[in-house]
Image (cartoon, rainbow, N blue to C red):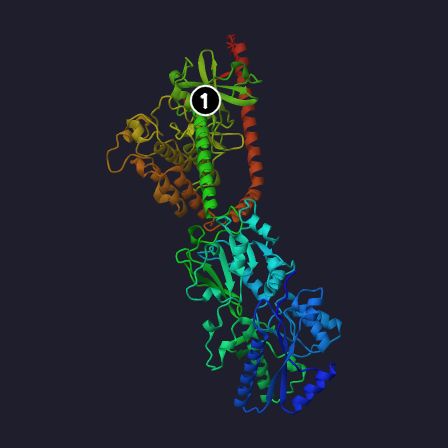
Amino acid sequence: MKTPLLALVLWSLLLRQGLPFWTSHVSRNCQDGSYEISVLMMNNSAFPEPLNNLEEVVKEGVKIVRQRLLEAGLNVTVNATFIYSDGVIYKSSDCRSSTCEGLDLLRTISVSAFNPDIGLFLTSWHSLDTDLNYPMISAGSFGLSCDYKETLTRMMSPARKLMYFLVDFWKFNFQFKPFSWNTAYVFKNSTETEDCFWYLNALEAGVSYFSQKLGFKEMLRGDTEFQDILMDQNRKSNVIVMCGGPETIRDLRGDRAVAEDIVIILVDLFNDHYFMDNITAPDYMKNVLVLTLPPENSVSNSSSSMNLSLAKNDFAAAYLDGVLLFGHMLKIFLENGEDITTSKFAHAFRNITFEGHVGPVTLDACGDIDNTMYLLYTSVDTSKYKVLLTYDTRVNQTSPVDKSPTFIWKNHKLPNDIPGRGPQILMIAVFTLAGTVVLLLLIALLVLRKYKREHALRQKKWSHIPPENIFPLESNETNHISLKIDDDKRRDTIQRLRQCKYDKKRVILKDLKHNDGNFTEKQKIELNKLLQIDYYNLTKFYGTVKLDSTIFGVIEYCERGSLRVRNQDHFQFPNQPTMCKKKKNCVVEILNGMSYLHSSKTEVHGRLKSTNCVVDSRMVVKITDFGCNSILPPRKDLWTAPEHLRVASVSQKGDVYSYGIIAQEIIQRRETFYTLSCRDQKEKIFRVENSNGVKPFRPDLFLETAEEKELEVYLLVKNCWEEDPEKRPDFKKIENTLAKIFGLFHDQKNESYMDTLIRRLQLYSRNLEHLVEERTQLYKAERDRGDWDWQIRTVDTVYKIDAGVPLVIQMVKNLPAVQETQI
């Protein structure tokens, strides 16, 4: 248990009728213009001040009050009555707090009194059915139970103010405190002074503001627990809060080692030791931050000539300021002509500022004193106490003072409250993370390198499709797919294309003119690239197969034949002068296929022409015969770029030139490379190859007859024909340009994606019926054409039989063969 402490109490004896003796006395004195202050005097070991000195302090305060009242023109008398405790009640009671002694005295004398913990006083007082409707001025009452009492005024900093500072400092961040704190240990034993007892009780309470704001708080009870935590590697916090003085740290720590990131917050509010001249901080205080109040003289700005030597400590100063506060309020009420025996006077001792013995004293709305707390640290350079920051309880604001303190902690910064999370640990974590990332990158690079190596090896391997997986068509009919460039009937220019089935799909077998079947490494890589291509506007390449010592490429079959044949079909493409929808679709679909092909690993077509643009059953234009440039030799034709006519090679810019020729062929609905100045194919090729003039030889576009909206398309086609390959646009640029041009055809310049989707759905809905009707007519035309051909062949066969002409029946082995023009 704790030792008896002083519980000096000041209060004004303005008693109500509930206490007959004091009421008659006060009433009589008030009528005579005399006012008396009753002062309860008890011994206190926390402030070893002789009671006779305290009595002199109160008397000095009464003199100052009389003088101030006289200067204000108020001729009244103010006296003080002192009530002493002989300590008998206190010593005999089971309670070892001065609070209990004060309560017992009040029971005995039936007078409003003051004690360090007015909360207990009030509780006991209420249990005695005592009316407290009069002012009480306390030089103590630190506990939380005394908070927010309407008639209680506290002249010394209560525990509530301490908790506000701790919470604010815990969340405070600055250069010297880079981390917000959220944990703490609170040390409490049975030897604290009475002020420390109530401060630590407030920090210990689970419902207190401090406890609610912290994520972790644990009490250390006893010296052993405190000493063990100083070097405990498994501690949960680096911060320890305690109350006392430097001697308390000395007795607890001794010569024991302390972890480098331990921070001790020492609450020692009423001790002027740290501000004395020639004071050197001992080594055991270097890990300690001291929370204290500045000495009274350092904040004094009063012009009063009173004798300040009597108020030697904060406790005596609280007595003196309590008397001056009573005089201040008495002066105000008397000047206003108000009755001081009413409850209004009892509730008036708050939210004011009055002239104390060393300067202005401010009381908050709860009647508690406001001041400025100092947080001190020990400089490792000078071993002196220095002010780190201040805390103004009026506005609850922390203000740094020393922005570059010389702490004992690493980098002169306060450590994190959680062990293992300081800057050095973070640095280790950063380096560990960086090392892990580097290691993972190395592993990823090794795996990627291995994958690339394996992929390269796979690319250099090639195997043919087994011949048994290639099946003939179920029908004996031979379908002709006309890919003829012109009417050249020479047998050496005819390439035989075979139709068959592979993987239940109808495919074309194209002769690769490679009889031995042993591809070079470059050719194998190129074939493997072709296998990876799968796009809507490109025919699928399935692989190669060896049949009868001939190597064939297995390619997707498109029923409608080449675009060139369809382009000359007036039923499919009506001869319209404008860019009709079908023409635009053909131009865009070829563009999409080439744009994808150039962005793939194949990179270049090499033999782009209208006969290599085929139409499938859904009327979608697809590009075929791409790649295989290392297998099939380049050829010279009307679609070949001039630079490749001069030097046999392939390039992406050459494909752009070929695309321009095809676009002109689709737009004009004419023969390939149509021009009025020349009709011979060989002459055209010769003039393109040997164009040395300013205007190279190109097909006719008839720009003068083009409509305004079509002119941009024509100019784009002309750009694809540029003699200089570098001036030709790439397919991505052509794609963007055509999108803008075709968008303008429909006033879609600023159209959003959703608007485009809705418009296309509407167009699809409107054109669906026409499309079905068109396809039906196409089917009927194909059917009628087949019936007519069958009738002609049947009549011709009958005539031959009647004439006795022998019929020659050709047996086809395995697969039906058809004659096709070379690609």
375 shown above or below 545: below
Query: Closer to the camera, 545 or 425?
Result: 425
243 shown above or below 704: below
- Residue 729 % position (x, y): 35, 39
Q: Amino acid at mark 1?
A: Arg
Query: Closer to the camera, 720 or 74?
Result: 74
Horizontal side, residue 792 vs residue 82: left or right? left
Position of the N terminus by quadrant: bottom right
Q: Does any portion of residue 613 appear in the rendered image? A: no
196 shown above or below 132: above
- Residue 405 % position (x, y): 42, 58
Position of the C terminus by quadrant: top left
Question: Where on the picture, by quarter, is residue 504?
Answer: top right
Q: Does any portion of residue 310 appear in the rendered image? A: yes
- Residue 238 % position (x, y): 53, 51
- Residue 50 % position (x, y): 57, 73
Question: Where on the picture, by quarter, is residue 56?
Answer: bottom right
* Number of numbered labels in the structure image: 1
Horizontal side, residue 295 vs residue 11: left or right? left
Kindly state the secondary structure of the residue where label 1 is placed: helix
For this orientation, the residue located farthest to the left is 693
Q: Which residue is mark 1?
A: 458
Q: Which residue appears at 53% of the width and 69% of the height?
A: 395
Estimate how packed mark 1 is, as few (under 14), some (14 to 19) or many (20 or more) residues with alpha carbons within 10 Å: few
Horizontal side, residue 211 vs residue 816: left or right? right
Query: Closer to the camera, 100 or 30?
Result: 100
Horizontal side, residue 730 vs residue 771: left or right? left
Query: Closer to the camera, 550 or 269?
Result: 269
Q: Which residue appears at 35% of the width and 34% of the height?
A: 653
